[in-house]
Amino acid sequence: MEALDMLSNNLANAATSGYKLDREFYTLFTGAEDDPADGSDSIKLPQIQKQWTDFSQGTLQPTGSPLDLALSGKGFFSVTGPSGPLYTRNGAFKLSQSGVLTTTEGYPVNTTTGGTIQTASQNPLTVSSDGTVVQDGQPLGQIAVMDFTDRAVLQKMGTSYFTNGNSAAQPAAADSVTVEQGKIEASNVNASESAVRLVGVMRQFEMLQKAISVTTDMDKKSLDEVARVGSGL
């Protein structure tokens, strides 16, 4: 059921910009049998120990919009969410009514100095490869692109945001990353692969349901037979 939910969520977000797919890590669950008939003292069953996020880069798709930004390389845009910093690969940005560069949800995009990108002009913005935003020849700030030494500390929030689940692991400025204007990073979900895996898991799920149903029917028949013999005596 966990694998089914995970794969279904991956497929549902196959077209979500900046989405990173989840994968499962399997281990063997060992449990003791009450009265093993063959002399063994344990059984082993597969078990999902945890899910992990695949942070591999998705395809950069040209959009032509000057407010659409994509990252080529490792790192995340830093934005200010309702409860603190959030990190995302979804660079579909916009200007708020007050002229602040924000995400589509309205979260302000952070700069390297801890501020925001703000303008009162309607003239187009130019974003260089290092994230510096320029308008009318004047720099408005440099967009912060952060990364973590261990991305396992990142926890998903929504479809394309991450929070830092370990306050001791602080992000640092990303290295070897390029900001590309007029592009959006697509989801890294391979829809065909995920669909095949989803069908396989659904078939396994159905087989387990049938096995449980057969076992239940056998137990019921056994009880009926015992009751019939008892009534005959």
Image (cartoon, rainbow, N blue to C red):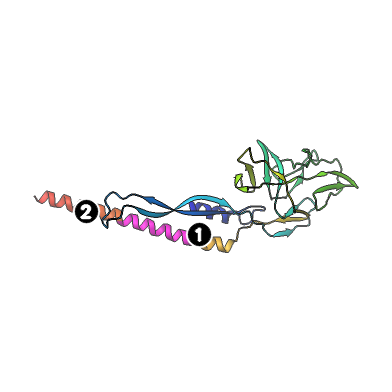
* Residue labelled with disc 2: 222
Label 1: how many residues lie within 10 Å, few (<14), some (14-19) or many (20+)? Answer: many
Extreme residue in the left direction: 233
Q: Residue at the spot x=73%, y=53% of the render?
A: 71
Label 2: how many residues lie within 10 Å, few (<14), some (14-19) or many (20+)? Answer: few
Residue 230, image x, y percentages? 13, 49
Front-lying residue, 198 or 29? 29
Real-space CA distance between mark 2 and mark 1, rounded to the nearest whole angstrom:
36 Å
Q: Residue at the spot x=34%, y=54% of the render?
A: 212
Q: Residue at the spot x=44%, y=61% of the render?
A: 203
Tell me: 46 left or right of 102.
left
Q: Is residue 10 above or below residue 166?
A: below
Q: Which mark is residue 184?
A: none
Residue 229, image x, y percentages? 13, 52
The secondary structure that most of the magenta stretch takes on is: helix
Residue 218, image x, y percentages? 26, 55
Extreme residue in the top direction: 83
* Residue labelled with disc 1: 198
Tell me: 17 left or right of 51.
right
Type of the residue with mark 2:
Ser
Report the span colored magenta.
199-214
Type of the residue with mark 1:
Leu
Note whether residue 66 is visible. Answer: yes
Front-lying residue, 17 or 98? 17
Tell me: 20 left or right of 143.
left
Residue 139 is a magenta residue: no
